[in-house]
Amino acid sequence: MSLLTPSTDPPAVPTSPGPWTTDGAPRPAIGGGGESASLEADRVSAWFGSHKVLEQVSLHMAARQVTALIGPSGCGKSTFLRILNRMHETTQGAGLSGEVRLNGVDIYAPGGRVTETRRRIGMVFQKPNPFPAMSIAENVTAGLKMTGLKPSRSDRDALVESCLQRAGLWNEVRDRLTHPGGALSGGQQQRLCIARSLAVNPDILLMDEPCSALDPTSTRYIEETIAELREDVTIVIVTHNMQQAARVSQHCAFFLAAAGTPGAIVEAGPTTQIFNEPSDPRTSDYVHGRFG
Amino acid sequence: MAVSVDPASVASTDLHALDEPRVIDPGLARADRVFRQVARSIGLSMLVLILAIGAFIGYQAIPTLRAYGLDFFTESAWQPELNRIGVSGALVGTIEIALIALFFGIPFAWASALFISEYAPPKLKSAVVSLVDLMAAIPGLVFGLWGFFLLQPHAIDLSRWLSQHLGWFPLFKVNTDADAAMWAQSRYTSSAFIAGIAVSMMVIPYACSVMRGVFAQAPIGEREAALALGATRWGVIRAVVLPFGRRGVIGGTMLALGRALGETVAVLLIISPTFEIKFNVIEVGTMTISALIAGRFGEASAGQLSALLAAGFVLFVLTLGVNAVAAVFVNRSRSGSITEA
């Protein structure tokens, strides 16, 4: 029996080479924005101090696809996600090995600008975190200021509208763009955070359990947003919600950490395959809710 | 199980009376009740102590205030032998020195607080914190000596430069020829300007400590949001830390002001006593209330003592007010704070 019917989008008809093989055709790393990009983790291990939390994780996150990272708590999914845009190193004592390649270029290569990497690989966090002192419109354009871009006033207004449109929030806030972002509901705040991430024109959007603090209606809005966004932004999402993973993703990676060992990928592949005919019995147990 | 109520009786009685909030017993355990009692009485005794000090000084000041009335606040001379006593000159000097101390001290405290909370690597951070805190442990006397012997010989060059270039502005006017080849150095020494710089060293640790405490509380969620957008550290500071820490900057500044207003020994060592309302701060001579009290206390007769206590009462009210404002800023939560990390 098919547990779930995955998203209606055709599964994995990649324009780039196969989703679980190495992308052999690196494209220039410059530019970006609107252009689809792929992300490749190559034998990534991670530590906090002397404690190893990730072991040799390799994963291809294909362009124009949503990749879901699933697995029980404490298996290193969020750590892995934070490694993908260099947020991992902001934690004290954090270390890593391996490579993360954005369109074939290692984001940890010496001489690379970390701020530019983070601009190109945006992130939405578990807890909505708009800047409370800024208005809704200022929140959307906050990233532009911080990355040193100064669009003209008309460009800015257009950008605010298009980002809020894409995040599915425009109709709710169009009449109160000058109100503080902190006054919105939790679900609206999270969509505001998505709009804010989109404003700096990222190639990749990482989402760390973006709906876990939200009600079902808000969750549905955000899932609809994700489905639309993947047209031009590659998305990697961490989720604890199996149904959500099945609904929004085309590819899935199952993480697991056995007691006392670092987390690792047990199985990765098209979402249909992971949910309906997983090759590893542990994956089967997890997606069928027998543990985790 | 509807309770039948006679409509007539409802109409006749006050509906609100039927719906009174009931008294809720907090239901504290015995240990909690005892602790609450102890904590409450200690807290109250602090309040009583402050009020008692204020009442004591105020009571002692009554004879003076009655004798001189409003003249006590407008007269600038302090000549008990001529029966001319007033705090206006010393009050102006006090405020001038405090503001000069803030002018030099606050940017320094602000920058070091930002460095400590945002830039310093962990090991350096604890070293810098200890050093800045150590500044608070250095006696005012030492800063006074430092100001007089080490700072003053150099600071007067800055004073002269100011009077040469900005002498048209009353604050920087000095009644001597600044451009003379043999310039009168003694006209620039022992001024409010130099005392203010010495005092600035003493307010830095207080302001820095409050500011860095508030900067460090800037929500991690917002910091990460800024970083994930591609912000530089300065971008994070501008978008998250400074808006969040504004009340800490204001509170720390007010606390420093309260401290600067009361500073005594360092000022007493540096200044040359002058009893007049004087706005040219880089010229020799000024006076503060605390320096006045410390300088005249030993030789004061009973009547003069009352006058000094009256001056002290003015300072007490001033610093209490400033510190109260500081407390309001430090404790007040920021506006629009929905997301707390």
Image: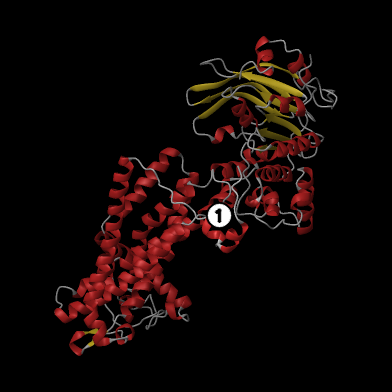
Number of callouts: 1
Tell me the quarter of the picture where residue A202 sits.
top right
The residue lying toward the viewer, choosing from A96 and A245, is: A245
Which colour style is shown? secondary structure
The residue lying toward the viewer, choosing from A281 and B248, is: A281
Residue depicted at x 42% and y 58%: B252
Give the left or right position of residue B226, taking residue B23 as reference: right
Residue depicted at x 17% and y 81%: B303
Depicted A193 relative to depicted B323: above or below = above
- The residue identified by callout 1 is B243
Query: In the structure shown, which secondary structural element does the residue marked by tag 1 occupy?
Result: helix
- Residue B107 showing in the rendered view: no
Residue depicted at x 69% and y 13%: A284
Quadrant the N terminus of chain A occupies: top right
Across and down, in percent, residue A264 comes to 61, 18
Across and down, in percent, residue A210 comes to 67, 35
User: Crowding at label 1, few (<14), some or many (≥20) Cα neighbours within 10 Å?
Assistant: some
The residue lying toward the viewer, choosing from B227 and A292, is: A292
Tell me the quarter of the picture where residue A153 sits.
bottom right
Quadrant the C terminus of chain A occupies: top right
Depicted B116 relative to depicted B66: above or below = above
Amino acid type, callout 1: Pro
Tell me the quarter of the picture where residue A190 sits.
top right
User: Given the image, what chain letter belongs to the residue carrying mark 1?
Assistant: B
